[in-house]
Amino acid sequence: MGNGEAAVIRKEMTISPGDFRRLLERLGGGRLRECGAACWRIGDVTIRASEMDELTMAALRLPRLAVSIDLSRLPPRHRDDFLRRFDQTFRRGGG
């Protein structure tokens, strides 16, 4: 994330709210704090999630969340590292 890039990252994620929260706790390493309904803080980062319509492909139905990650309070030099850890935490195997 270079200088001048947006400090709020938006993602659509196929994950249930419960699994999202569980993985956020892993990412936060004891620093996860609630800041409202479907809103959490990990240090200087604020993360919000809202449910979207399920993703449907034939008989497959997947829960979906709209996620925003606000990095504006995090020093720019730490943003790439946080996003890398977020992506690693939420990475799933696939084939």
Image (cartoon, helix red, strand yellow):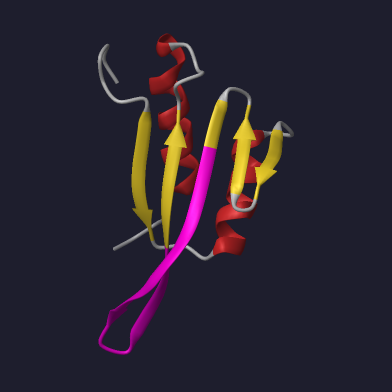
Residue at the far right: name it. 30
> Split into 4 quadrants, where in the image is the C terminus?
bottom left
66 or 28, nearer to the observer: 66
* Visible residue check, residue 91: no
- Location of residue 6 with respect to 68 vertically, above or below: above
Residue at the far bottom: name it. 59
Residue at the far front: name it. 36
Residue 28, percent across and down?
64, 35
Q: Is residue 91 magenta?
A: no
72 or 19, nearer to the observer: 72
Q: Quadrant of residue 88?
A: top left
Magenta segment, prevailing SS (helix, strand or loop):
strand
At 50% from the left edge and 42% from the top edge, which residue is drawn?
89
Residue 3, percent across and down?
27, 11
Q: Quadrant of residue 54?
A: bottom left
At 51% from the left edge and 45% from the top edge, which residue is drawn?
48
At 55% from the left edge and 55% from the top edge, which residue is drawn?
20
Q: Is residue 17 left or right of residue 57?
A: right
Which residues, given as a range, are shown in magenta? 47-64
